[in-house]
Image (cartoon, rainbow, N blue to C red):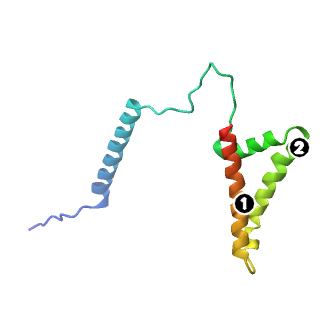
Amino acid sequence: MKTFKSEKRFYPDYLSEIIFSILIALELLLVLVLIFPPEVGRQIDFSKPFQPLPEWYFLWLFELVSYFPGNLMFIGTFLIPLSCILLLLLIPFLDKGKYGRIKAYIAGSAVLLVFCLFTILSLVE
C-alpha cells in the first residue's frame, strides 16, 4: 500500500506560491500607480521669475553666500563649511580627558545650531 506525503516541498509548491504572490502584488501596484499617478517635482508658476533654490540640506550654504559677497565669498563657501567639518571630525579627540564629553557635546551642538540657524534664516527670507 502506497502512502502519500502531505508535506509541501519548496520546489515547486512554495516557489509557485511566492511567484504568484509577487505577480499579484506587482499588478496591484501597477493599477494603483495608473489610477493615482505621483506628482514629480514642484509645481511651476510661470507668472513669477525663476528663483533657483538648492535642496534643504544646502540651504545653509546658500545663506552663507548671501552674507559674504564678492571677494569675501571664499570665507562663506570654503572656510566656514571646512571649519564645521573639521570640528565634527575632531569630536572623538575632544571627547578625551576631563570634561571631554561636555566639550564634544558643545562642539556638536554648535555645528548643529549653525546648520539649523542658517537653514531657518534662508527659509524665512
Q: Determine if residue 58 is in view.
A: no
Identified at 84% across, 52% down, the residue is 79
Identified at 86% across, 48% down, the residue is 75
Distance between the Cα atoms at labels 2 and 1?
23 Å
Dot 2 or dot 1, earlier in sequence: 2
Q: Amino acid at mark 1?
A: Ala
Which image quarter holds the C terminus?
top right
Write down the residue under mark 1. 110
Q: Find numbered disc 2 in the image and state the secondary structure of the residue it sits on.
A: helix
The answer to whether 60 appears left or right of 7 in the picture is right
Outermost right residue: 71
The answer to whether 87 appears left or right of 112 in the picture is right
Whether residue 27 is situated above or below residue 8 in the rendered picture: above
Identified at 73% across, 77% down, the residue is 99
Write down the residue under mark 2. 72
Q: Amino acid at mark 2?
A: Leu
Identified at 62% across, 20% down, the residue is 46
Write down the quadrant of residue 65 in the picture: top right
Q: Determine if residue 17 is in view.
A: yes
Write down the quadrant of residue 44 in the picture: top right
> Label 2 crowding class (10 Å Cα cut-off): few <14, some 14-19, many 20+?
few
Whether residue 109 is situated above or below residue 28 in the rendered picture: below
